[in-house]
Image (tube, rainbow, N blue to C red):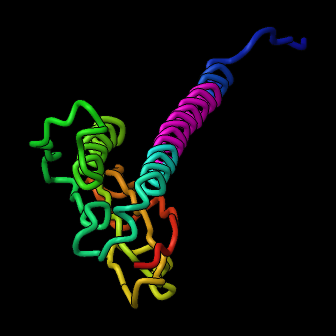
Amino acid sequence: MHRSEGGFSLIEVLVAALVLVFGVIGAIGMQLTALRTTQQSIFHSSALHLAADMADRMRANLGRMQTFDRDNPYLQVDLAAEQSVPHSDTACYDPRGCDPRQIAQLEIDAWLRRLAETLPGARVRICRDLTPWHTAEASFSWDCEETGPSTPVLIKIGWRDKNESGGEDRISSPRIVLPVASFAQ
């Protein structure tokens, strides 16, 4: 007599459950990667928007941009992630009563506060730089190499990110580098 077997054996059920578990784990991993990528995209968009905003402000305050670099408050912006955002001492509520330097300092302080609120551990530097890209390191650099008044003005922005290996925070290089102009003195 032949005995016919019906249904699934316990081993077949366990193998099916194991395949299902691996599929669910893979789907969760893909979802986490998508969320992380979306967050970084939002940070990039915000940083680019903030850099463009500062570039517009610099172009609007042409009187300040055409002064010597040591007198230009825009070219003095260098905020490290661990520094606190400065607050302006100037109480300039009527722009007609303020000189261009006071207006520039108010704009810079307000912009730095927005930057710190928008990006985690924001780092920013505005300077003249002829070679922002370092080929050997294959990345942008925080250093500024000025060769004269015709050197382009750059806005460099970075923020903290969790690296994949140890979960440590790092700001190794600028993520956004926006050229503004070469503003001759």
- In the displayed structure, 137 sits above or below 52; it is below
Image coordinates for residue 64, horizontal then vertical, percent = 34, 62
Image coordinates for residue 51, horizontal then vertical, percent = 46, 51
Q: Is residue 120 visible?
A: no
Q: Is residue 43 visible?
A: yes
Q: Does residue 159 show up magenta in the picture? A: no
- Going 32% across and 51% down the picture, which residue do you hit? 160
Q: Is residue 166 left or right of residue 51?
A: left
Which stretch is magenta?
18-47
Q: Residue furthest toward the top? A: 6
Q: Residue furthest toward the right? A: 1
Front-lying residue, 73 or 79: 73
Image coordinates for residue 80, horizontal then vertical, percent = 21, 59
- In the displayed structure, 37 sits above or below 157; it is above
| Occupied quadrant, residue 63 | bottom left
Front-lying residue, 155 or 134: 155
- In the displayed structure, 24 sits above or below 42; it is above
Front-lying residue, 103 or 45: 103
